Image: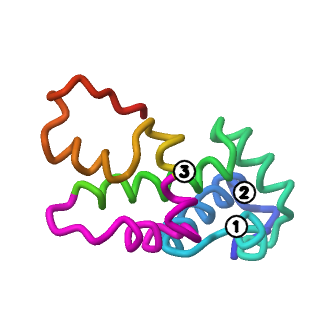
């Protein structure tokens, strides 16, 4: 949990660091903002407000993008598992939720992304949205 000591030099920085560490440590779980609130001892609305103000992105978006970045890296591994195993390893509740989130974020399905990267991103004129 985050120290709520009023004498802390940067309480917002402590909150952000705690959020980042917790998200990274639990990336394979279906983590919610409520889980982060319990971990930090702050309200959901406070966490969302501090995170957006300090980072310029929503907390939920950060959590989703962290999981999708890990998934994208896993999809490019030589001996990668199935799409379903990658979805679970990245904390998605189903392969369908994962596929939808991945395609919305990257503009390409997870399986097509894996093939695209393996074949070389310069071929075929396909553009991946980052």
Residue 55 included in the magenta stretch of the image:
no
The spot of residue 33 in percent (x, y) is 73, 63
Distance between the Cα atoms at labels 3 and 2? 36 Å
Which residues are the magenta region?
77-99
- Taking the image as shown, residue 50 lies to the left or right of residue 26, namely right
Residue 91 included in the magenta stretch of the image:
yes
Identify residue for label 1.
32
Identify residue for label 2.
11
The spot of residue 57 in percent (x, y) is 65, 39
Q: Quadrant of the N terminus?
A: bottom right
Please name the residue shown 39% across and 58% down the image. Answer: 70
Please name the residue shown 67% across and 52% down the image. Answer: 60
The crowding category of the residue bearing disc 1, from other C-alpha atoms within 10 Å (few below 14, some 14 to 19, many at least 20), is few
- Taking the image as shown, residue 119 lies to the left or right of residue 27, namely left
Residue 43 is tagged as none
Please name the residue shown 74% across and 38% down the image. Answer: 53
Chain-order first, disc 3 or disc 2: 2
Marks 1/3 in contact by CB < 8 Å: the verdict is no
């Amino acid at each position: 949990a985050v120290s709520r000591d009023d004498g802390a030099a940067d309480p917002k920085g402590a909150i952000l660091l705690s959020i980042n560490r917790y998200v990274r440590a639990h990336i394979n779980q279906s983590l919610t903002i409520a889980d982060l609130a319990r971990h930090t001892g702050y309200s959901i609305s406070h966490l969302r407000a501090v995170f957006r103000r300090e980072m310029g992105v929503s907390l939920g978006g950060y959590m989703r993008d962290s999981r999708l970045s890990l998934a994208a890296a896993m999809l490019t591994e030589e001996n990668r598992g199935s799409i379903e195993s990658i979805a679970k390893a990245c904390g998605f509740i189903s392969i369908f939720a994962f596929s939808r989130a991945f395609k919305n974020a990257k503009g390409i399905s997870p399986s097509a992304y894996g093939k695209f990267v393996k074949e070389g991103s310069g071929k075929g004129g396909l553009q991946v949205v980052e």
